[in-house]
Image (tube, rainbow, N blue to C red):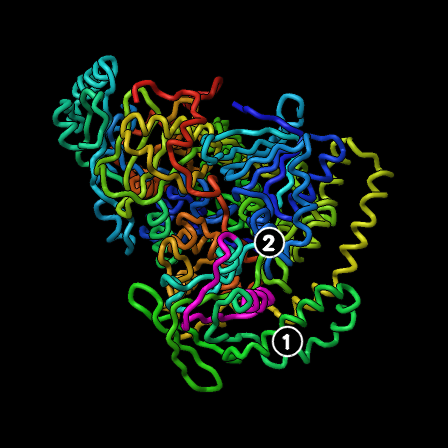
Amino acid sequence: MTDDTCDVIVIGAGPAGLAAAQSVADQGLSVRLIDEQPTAGGQIWRNAAVVTRRGGPLAKSYGGAVAALSVLRNDHVKHATSATVLEVALSQTSDTARDPPVCVTWLSATQDARGVRETAARALIVATGAMERPVLFPGATLPGVMGIGAVQSVLKQSGLVPTGDGVVLAGQGPLLMLTLGQILAHGGSVAAVLDFGQSGRVARTTSGLFPALLSDPAIMAQGAALLWRARRSGVAWHRGVTGLRAIGKDGIEQIAFETGGKTMQLTCSLLAVHDGVIPNTQLTRLLALDHVWSNAQQAFAARSTPEGATSAPSVWVAGDGAGIAGAEVARLRGALSGLDVARALGALGDPEFRTRADPLKRHISRRGPARAFVDKLYAPLPVTAFSKDNAAASTVVCRCEAVTLARVHDAIRDGATGPNRVKTFTRCGMGACQGRMCGNALTRIVAAATRSAPQDAGALRIRPPLKPTLISDYLDLSPTHDPLS
Amino acid sequence: MTPDRHDLAVIGAGLMGLSVALEARTRGMSVVILEAETCARHASSASAGGVRSLNRHPAEIALTRAALPLWEGLAYRLGRDCGFRRSGQIRVAEDAEAMQALEDRATAIAALGFDHERLVTRDELKARIPAIADHCLGALVVDDDGFADPLATAHAWRHANARAGVLIREHTRVMSLERSTAGLRLATAAGPIEAGCVVNTAGAWGDRIAGFAGDGMPVRTAALQMIVTARMPAFVDPVVGSQGRKLSLKQTAAGSVVIGGAYKGDVREGPDGPLRGVPRAGRAASNLANAVSLFPALRAARVTRIWAGLEGMTPDGLPYLGQSRTMPGLFHAFGFSAHGFALAPLIGPLMADLLEGKRNNHAIAPFAPGRFDSVGSV
């Protein structure tokens, strides 16, 4: 019961998804843009209309939003907000006239229209962006412990930053620096930063500095300003930290950690942790696409061509979901994948495609050295870097099913040679989030323990629905809905 | 390359293969299991885990009744918990026609000499399952049926095999099978293997293995869907089905509700036969509608996962159990057609008896491998 058809479905309305929709619509093709948020913009431009109107320090990072969002006024683009994708089916037949190659089942949860829909299309562009890398340490599941991303969301959604004298940021990466600056600029306070970065790394990385400066001076200048302001902020800065623990009864009260051979303890009301972002691969895993492990980013992404074409003929990926490269490159890759889809669907000839695609490709490759520099400077920490070896029994890997690192290690010793085996042995990754939170950590843990390459260790299989879904919503799809009930 | 030699090679490390291998090893044979993918990858992990003698095909009733006591001791035998619970199984009637069908069934079963299936009234049904919808009129019940956790069971069996000295070769697809001087010779992805005898427990791939020997044993591959919800407060103890409706519903000890009903997903084909099952939302919705009609409160439950495992279905829904007609030393135990789980502990001893040429009391003539031959005789 497909109730909606279009040429191209784009999932995710961040910089990549918006640009992809624009490219596709520019060629006269119809687009269904499906996004989980109530307004478009993705994580980077969350709540864009309000933030840009409000002005202030945050609005500065919304520079590209207005232009990107204008695609929503295009007649060829239908935008579904507050919409969750449950399942994507790819047709196996080649009779595309009778059997469209892609069918997306999604739940609309807007205030005036709730219901499950099915949309069929000739092609799919997956632009589901990035998510924070899971960070494991004892006490990480206590209320009051969150990812830096959650602090970002609240700031963008409601203009609020954490206050009080117990705010601690821990980990590493540009987003941690950015968030520190934003909290301070919005009148919040930060008691301490626990820097897990390796000392001396800057020196080792300087070989790539000059090419990086040439490649993306704006990003590099922004990064330097962040570092400079952070150093001058007067916030207590602990370096070379290990052995983090969050302590509390019903919520976080204290943190303990080791630095310079000493154990320190601080009062803490909010602990925000971060070790970079990774591609969100739930959807591409659901489709069982080929994935490739990036050693630099310590994460999987769907294998794709520069234009975003994947191992499935009707599916493209774009943006950070195809490998982390930041918002501007995400926008460029979105535009490029949209052109490639238009070409594949016959709406754009080869010469015209090249005329439009070549400048995009040049812009993307020019920014490569800056990304390589940042990847090296903030190389992901080992998966157990936040914790201590002897804390495995109190370090939770899977929050949904409360599976500890010690139990994962037991399963591996028991013959679990991959994440899916660990899942069947321990229920790790079998809960409500299906391993979205722990999957990256699980692959790295298994690979390290079995001395295998993460590529060979593999990743958790993902099943529909992508998010837990009310049975009453599912009943919309039932052709035999029973009058007896 | 000199082939490895074993008394027995088992093809397929699902529950049936694991059961046969462990029993044969216990009786002193040297055993290797050859598994094309990984242990319990398909039907065994998409199983609903029902340990059910209720509403069985008459030919299978005696076997399932014989298997039930084995479940009691299985955790002890395997050294690990299998999540087995004697929760009972219940088949409700939602209208007069269904009630009549259950009454007829009870009469027919009694005439065959069985007394394990019992009719219960509407009041008794409601007393057993207060959450059941008011329109239900009564039910057929087997009190000593139950269910187990398929993953835990497979895990336990695999472990017991490894401990007993059975070689489990995963990612080792069997590519051919032929007679040799010492018995049978198998070509596998990891080299040749010689075995005194071979048991084919390859499930959805069982027909391909049988084909190596020239045994024409049709199976259709089905991707059987299962649905699981987030945890809920306990509301139902027995496994529940409904006469005239495709449904099997149970609540696990953890509180999640597992819903099946033989709804089928899509089968993805690969170069070596069926590759994997792909669940479909629309068919899951039909399954969920059936569940909600019996338990209206389920509307507010959340589905967390739908998956599909590949199973071999025979034309008459009964398994193939017995020796190959064309290749002595080859034995078949596949085609359990989505209801083999309960039989798994029995299939080991049953097949081991066949291998050893021992007599037993199990009537397996209805499961003869050659029963669909148009020309040959069984």
Q: In this rendering, would A106 be left or right of B342?
A: right
The Cα atoms of the two marked residues, 1 and 2, are separated by 23 Å
B180 or A50, nearer to the observer: A50
**Above or below: residue A271 compared with residue A472:** below
Q: In this rendering, would A231 be left or right of A307?
A: left
In this picture, which residue range is highlighted in magenta? A157-182
Identity of the amino acid at label 1?
Answer: Trp
B251 or B158, nearer to the observer: B251
- Quarter occupied by residue A474: top left
Under circle 1, the secondary element is helix
Residue that badge 2 annotates: A44
Q: Name the residue: 73% across, 39% down.
A: A23
Residue that badge 1 annotates: A228
Pointer 2 local density, CA inside 10 Å: few below 14, some 14–19, many at least 20: some
Q: In this rendering, would B304 be left or right of B364?
A: right
**Measured from the top left, where is residue A480 in percent x and y?**
40, 20
Q: Does the magenta stretch include residue A180?
A: yes
Q: Is residue A353 magenta?
A: no
